[in-house]
Amino acid sequence: MTGTKKSSLAAVALAVAVAAALAVTACGQQRPAGPASASVTSAGNSAPATTGHEGRIAPVSVSFASPSDGWLLAVPPCARQAHPCRTLLLRRTTDGGRSWAPATPPPAPYAGLSAHPADAVGQILFTSRRDGWAYGPGLWRTVNGGASWRRVGFSGGQVLGVAAAGSRLLVLAGRCGSAGSAAGSATGSAAGSAACRFTVYSSPARPGAWHRVQVASGRYAGAAVLTASGGTGYVLATLRLGPPLLLAGPADGSARWRQAREPCGGSWSTAFAAAGRRLFLGCGSEPGAGTQSKTAYVSANGGLNWHRVANPPIGGYLGAASMTPGGLILLSGGRMDVYISRDFGRSWHTSPSLAAAASLAGAGFSLVASATGDATGYAFQESVYRHQFWLTSDGGRHWTAVTVR
């Protein structure tokens, strides 16, 4: 596999955890992301009865280490009920998502609820067939493809994001308020007066000591997203007052991270992706009645210069982006279809084969999408127990539905 493909896959794997950008707010508050399911529970977790759903489960995070090898973190239906359980389930695919088999989940509670302990998780990232991470706000690691997990002690605050950057691993951690408590209420909004601080840490891919490479403080209104491409890391934070904060720098900390220029100005939400030196940034205005005005920009030189591309459709609320070196961009978010560009944002399209899923997205079941190659990708949907995972092999023109059990 070439270095370009490796960096692309690392960015893709992150983009899904970033689909968690739909799920992780700047101060560690977590909202459930999207779905994909399975039926047999892993060792150590006994799933409750799923009467009426035939053992189907709801995906919350997906990560592919290659176009064929992927993992899906999920919860059983009870996790969405008034008295939720906290069971986590894990599924693995070796055929690109066409079939899924049970794997052992981390022995941690689910973090997508309003109150959760410090070791809870809601997102996953796999950087190879063997090395994977479960995080948010806790941090767990596997070195055998999900057969077993151990908790990683981390003193930097709640873990908001994990990203592979060349031979390095980056972790975004944050604290809010004078006591370092989680900001905000169960609504997922940042506390109105809490000052939040986040730190980026770096370590070799097989972690040794964590090295602090970047610190920033501010009043964050929305998600802080960590992503990487090659040996460069990026953090995009939405501020309560003023334009988003975009930071970029070497993942090994060999030079100080710089504040990169961003073209959004003030934005209610953003979507960010990186592939090589090319960056994509989507900017969403304050939404209303299921719609949101959106603009989009692309940089070919790591954020030094930006040019505006076509506006994404007005429907829904911008949440996450995934981009490949060949120009495929997938946009997803709340109450919206997946918006697809195959020419670096010069035009946007939807797919009729996702119409049924998009109608559920309009009812509040978030539809999340990510690319695994210039023509391949997947989408998954929150809280839906059949046809909740889709695959494309033609750049998003057609999608095939899969029900994970």
Image: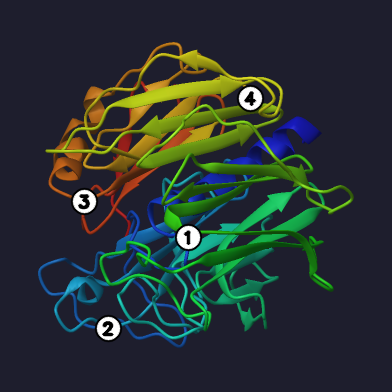
Query: Badge 4 is on which residue?
Result: 325
In the picture provided, is 142 more to the left or to the right than 20? Answer: right
Disc 1 or 2, which lies upstream in sequence? 1
In the picture provided, is 234 more to the left or to the right than 106? Answer: right
Q: Are marks 4 and 1 in contact (CB under 8 Å)?
A: no
Q: Which mark is residue 85?
A: 2
For the residues marked 2 and 4, what is the alpha-carbon distance in whole angstroms?
41 Å
Q: Which mark is residue 169?
A: none
Front-most of residues 337 and 115: 115
For the residues marked 3 and 2, what is the alpha-carbon distance in whole angstroms?
20 Å
Local SS, label 2: loop
Local SS, label 3: loop
Whether residue 161 is situated above or below residue 66 in the rendered picture: below
Disc 1 or 3, which lies upstream in sequence? 1
Q: Which mark is residue 365?
A: 3
In the picture provided, is 373 more to the left or to the right than 181? Answer: right
Mark 3 crowdedness (10 Å alpha carbons): few <14, some 14-19, many ≥20: many
Identity of the amino acid at label 4? Pro
Identity of the amino acid at label 2? Cys
Point 53% across, 45% down: residue: 15
Nearer the camera: disc 1 or disc 3 = 1
Disc 4 or 1, which lies upstream in sequence? 1
Disc 2 or 4, which lies upstream in sequence? 2
Point 24% across, 32% down: residue: 292
Mark 4 crowdedness (10 Å alpha carbons): few <14, some 14-19, many ≥20: some
Identity of the amino acid at label 1? Ala
Q: Are marks 1 and 2 in contact (CB under 8 Å)?
A: no
Query: Badge 1 is on which residue?
Result: 26
